[in-house]
Image: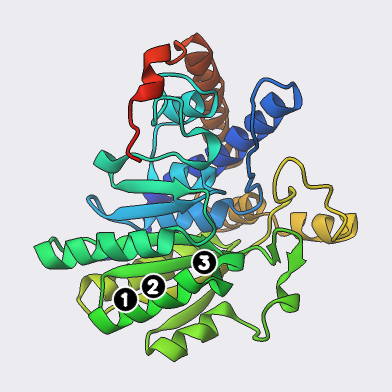
Amino acid sequence: MMEVTRELLEKMYYRMNQARFFEEKVAWLFSRGLVHGTTHLAMGQEASAVGAGLALEKGDLVSLTHRGHAQAIGFGLDVNRMMAEFLGKATGYCGGKGGSMHIADIKAGNIGANGVVGGGYPLSCGAALTQKYRNTGKVVLCFAGDGSTNEGNFHEALNLASVWKLPVVFFVENNLYGMSTPIEKHMNIENISDRAAAYGIPGITIDGNDILEVYKITWKSLQYARAGKGPVLLESKTYRYNGHSKSDAQVYRTKAEVESWKKKDPILKFENYLSNSGQMSAEEMEALKSRAYQSIEDAVAFAESSPEPPITAVLEDVYA
């Protein structure tokens, strides 16, 4: 039964702040040339990722996107091992080989973040088919971005999941831009969730900056799929403050637009709710925020003190 307890509220607030501090630290590390490659930040999308992750039950599975730090934290992954992976250390989730875009932990139920746009759709269907075949009662939550919903994988996966009634919830984070392209320039519908009708499955659009709404609707959708009724398409409308990647000059949008969304910041919105409803005092929130900040500082220390992968590791984990 869905119940929003004090413990859950604390987890929501803690993990949202953890996700924000993690990505602020990631941006700082990049700015100093301490990390190679690229990364995709999701500051502003914390309520969407964390709220959805917390709606899962023990044993459920999840697939993440290339913009997956907050999704991983919402799912409950260890920020120490996440930071170690980000810095390419042997103690990372993938031994330092996956980096920012490929954090995976099969044992924990995270079948992986994916650098391929829409790459998680067919993987999630396969994982969901396994749950159905084995009658585990578990569900797969498939994170995706709005740009991926024009990929063939999206339509093939929704069709297959619908026909086979697979226990999967497709959770699309719509941050209004597919890289640099505004959604209205590549999609002739108001809501991505409208596409669910073509496959005879429920489609729901939610406020991705309201963590309580995200949690409640995602929980209900997961229970629907868990009951054997088939998949659900959720569209979580939110916004990313940063560019698509570290190389994005953001010439496609104005600073005023970004600032207008920052006034609807999901963490600030949740703080106002907790305060106005009497659920949590300012002192209690500050204590949780301080703990979250320290957890990221500790994660950096853990990663920096971790060993580099041995040269022999280059021949390990090679499958093709």
Q: Which mark is residue 172?
A: 3
Q: Whole-percent x and y of residue 197?
A: 45, 90
Task: State if disc 1 and disc 2 touch (CB < 8 Å).
Answer: yes
The residue drawn where x is 25% and y is 79% is: 165
Residue 264, picture quadrant: bottom right
Task: Identify whether 298 is placed above or below 37.
Answer: above
Q: Quadrant of the C terminus?
A: top left
Q: Secondary structure at mark 1?
A: helix
Give the number of the mark in front: 2 or 3. Answer: 2
Q: CA distance from mark 2 to mark 1?
A: 6 Å
Residue 301 in view of the camera: yes
As drawn, is 54 to the left or to the right of 299?
left
Query: Mark 1 — residue?
Result: 161
Going by the numbered disc 2, the residue's amino acid type is Ala
Q: Whole-percent x and y of residue 83?
A: 51, 27
Task: State if disc 3 and disc 2 touch (CB < 8 Å).
Answer: no
Give the number of the mark in front: 3 or 1. Answer: 1
As drawn, is 240 to the left or to the right of 78?
right
The residue drawn where x is 20% and y is 75% is: 227
**N-terminal of the two: label 2 or label 3?**
2
Query: Mark 2 — residue?
Result: 157
Residue 237 in view of the camera: no
Foreground of the two, 187 or 176: 187
